[in-house]
Amino acid sequence: MNYLSEKHKTLSESQQSGLMLWFGRLPMDKKAVAIGLSLTVGIGSAAMAWKGESSNRIYFCVRTPQKKLVCQDQNNRPFRMTPFYWEQWQLEGMPRQVVRDPAMGVNGLVKATNPYKPFWAFGGFLGFALAGWMLRHCQNEEKQRAVFEDIAQKRDAAKAEMAARSELLESYRDVAIAEVQLQADLDLIANDRTVDITKAEIYAHTEIEVTQMEASDAIFEAQTAGMTEEQKADYIKQLREMKTPYLQGSQTLAGTIDPNDKVTGSEAGAMPSAASYASQDNKTAWVQNLVKQTALIWGNQGGGKSWLARYVIQLKKQAGYRVIVLDPDSNRSEWRGVESYHSWDDIEQQIRDYVEELESRLKTFNNSSLSESQWRQKLWAEGKALSLICEEATTYGDFIKDAELLDKFGKLALTKSRKQEMPITVVAHNNTQTCLFGIKGLHNLVSKMLQVECLAEVDPVTLQPSSTGFAKVKLDSSNEWLDVNLPKMTAKISDFSDALPAESNPNPPIDKATLERIYELEFNLGNKVGDTQDEPKKLSPMAQKLYEYLTRTERIEADVREFKGNFKVNGERFTVEQIKGWMYEIVGAGLADWIGEGVIRINQI
């Protein structure tokens, strides 16, 4: 037996007899022999104790008045007693009618046939007890041995499993190293080819520019042949001051290319602030935040929630989303031009399909090697941009019985949908998690999301609620509520079939590089383009860090509201206005272009 300590061993041995200590040291075969001998003694002694009588007996009869001897009772059992009790009976006055039975033994006395019967019985008890004691001792030791054997088996199994895993990991490591080496070789080859192609393009472009410059010089020389230097200078001045078909009104080329007329990001008031922007006609530009982000539109009845949702759907269709509307309180005539579902069975099935598709995209993206921006571009290129509109979401938990599905749908949609191009817009009467499909957990999940509270007022005469035309907006991960104007609509939008995708614009704007080339070929007349352009503007240190962060994270479009929480320098975070100022510098340096309020597109180099 394994003891916990010497004290444990001393106490245990003090509770055992010397016989059991001796027995515990015997090997198993000798223990079996000892148990067998003890059982033999017990069985033999019990058999000897079973037979014969242990004491003498006197058989007697009772004489009846008719002189008849009655030697048995009514159950035919003979009258008998021991000599001790016979003598006691005689001393106490035995009746004369009682006489010894002459038919039994010598004058009724029958000698004992087994006078040692009690000793044999004690020997049988002792043999059985000793055998049981030894068996119990063996049983305890067997239990302990079984425990150790079980531990040994588990240890051996664990060692075998660890060895197998080690071998498998080694195989994985070898495969991973081979894949990395192969990818490195492919990247090196691709980089070499890219360098060669870039060199060829630069050489070709240089040759073209040199040829064009030579041609411009030849044309200028031909046009000014015979002119003196003063006449040439006057001619050039006349060309620069003349009006061109590319300018309007009183604009001149010299005034247009004047370096002093440029807007820089460092000048105070060069670009309109957020307040001045809102004070112009674009007071509803904030609605663009609801197009690509998961958002909650809520408020009292009559506040304009549904009208705002329909306006957002129109913008989503123009952006190229596939829009699906879930509205249990209307029918398809209210949603012409978009997919709409109105029975609870159809709504539940659409929610189930949405959850399966979102989980499938997450799994595919996690197993791919694409960056986030590349993955989102791939989804748009494949036409998989999807947006779900959940009208009257407050009632979903009452009529859709699969509470687990609703809970999963709410949590996934509110946390994982935007980066998979599957944003949802929820229309509800309140902004609690109970109103949003009854989801539980994820503390403050709703309070952190993009929300719009449509404000309503009650008419003092009719007592009917109506929209005030105003709302409050809380941006994603912000606690500040901003006052905004709702889009003005004279009628409810029910037909969305006229909304065209944004890509259908047939006349894209002329970019800066194209305008410069037009000027060089048509008006520069031999002078270098660089003579009439500003030198590249240098960024401030913080603007440079912001630009490096945007390029390092492979962003094509950068929304200040999206990356604000991730951009920090030495642990310091910055306000939206600070980041916007640096974005103005980046745009002023020609490294990006504005495409919306707080949104820029990085120019690809």
Image: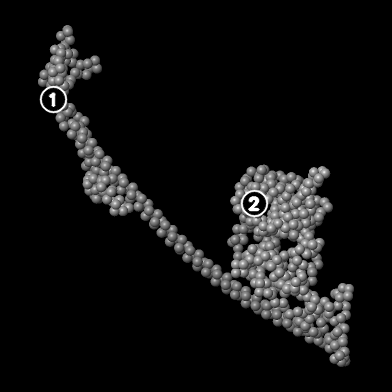
Name the element at disc 1: loop
Name the element at disc 2: helix
Query: Would residue 29 be found to the left or right of residue 436 on screen?
Result: left
Determine whether 413 is above or below 229 in the image.
above
Determine whether 570 is above or below 54 in the image.
below
**Residue 60, image x and y in percent?**
16, 17
- Can residue 520 be seen here? The reply is yes
Q: Which residue is pictured at 18% across the width and 13% down the height?
A: 70
**Residue 206, image x and y in percent?**
73, 82
Seen from this angle, which residue lies furthest front?
460
Q: Nearer the N terminus, badge 1 or badge 2?
A: 1
- Can residue 556 be seen here? The reply is no
Q: Nearer the viewer, residue 29 or 250?
A: 250
Q: Nearer the viewer, residue 605 or 427?
A: 427
Q: Nearer the viewer, residue 131 or 237?
A: 237
Q: Which residue is mark 1?
A: 111
Residue type at mark 1: give it: Lys
Determine whether 286 is above or below 31 in the image.
below
Q: Which residue is mark 2?
A: 410
Q: Which residue is pictured at 47% across the width and 62% down the height?
A: 168
Residue type at mark 2: give it: Gly
